[in-house]
Image: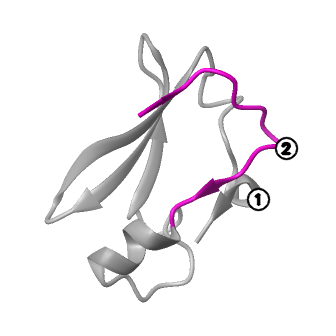
Amino acid sequence: DTITDFTPGVDKINLQGVLDNLGYTGSDPLSDGTIQVLDSPKGAQVQINSNGSYRTLIVLQGLTTAQAPKLSDLLF
């Protein structure tokens, strides 16, 4: 999915269902590497690690990782 109007600090991204489907039981998927946010030419990518490889869940068009959601913008 591509989000074209995400506002950090205002909007939230709920990843709880995706993490539940993976059987995730940790407390901080950003710190443990289950979720990562990377820069790409199209915008910041929110990726999930499943079975040892990352796949892109969301592209935040027009944002960089410096502007991308932090832990407070992601719901687990």
Residue at the spot of label 1: 72
For mark 1, give the secondary structure. helix
Tag 2: residue type? Answer: Gly
Where residue 23 sits: x, y (%)? 31, 84
Q: Which residues are magenta?
A: 1-15
Q: How is the image coloured?
A: one colour
Rendering quarter of residue 14: bottom right
Tell me if label 2 and label 1 are in contact, CB under 8 Å.
yes
Q: Residues within 10 Å of mark 2 (few under 14, many from 20)?
A: few
For mark 2, give the secondary structure. loop
- Give the dominant element type of the magenta stretch: helix, strand or loop: loop
Up-down relation of residue 57 to residue 67 (above or below): below
Residue at x-position 71% and y-position 51%: 12
Where residue 36 sits: x, y (%)? 45, 49
Residue at x-position 28% and y-position 75%: 22
Where residue 56 sits: x, y (%)? 32, 40
Q: Is 36 a magenta residue?
A: no
Residue at the spot of label 2: 9
Up-down relation of residue 16 to residue 61 (above or below): below
The tag earlier along the polypeptide, 2 or 1, is 2
Numbered-mark total: 2
Residue at x-position 40% and y-position 62%: 33
Q: Residue reaching furthest bottom? A: 25
Task: Depth check: give the residue in front, 6 or 47.
Answer: 6
Task: Depth check: give the residue in front, 18 or 45.
Answer: 18
In the drawing, does residue 12 fall left or right of residue 76? right
Residue at x-position 69% and y-position 23%: 5
Tag 1: residue type? Answer: Ser
Q: Is 2 a magenta residue?
A: yes
Return the mark for residue 53. none
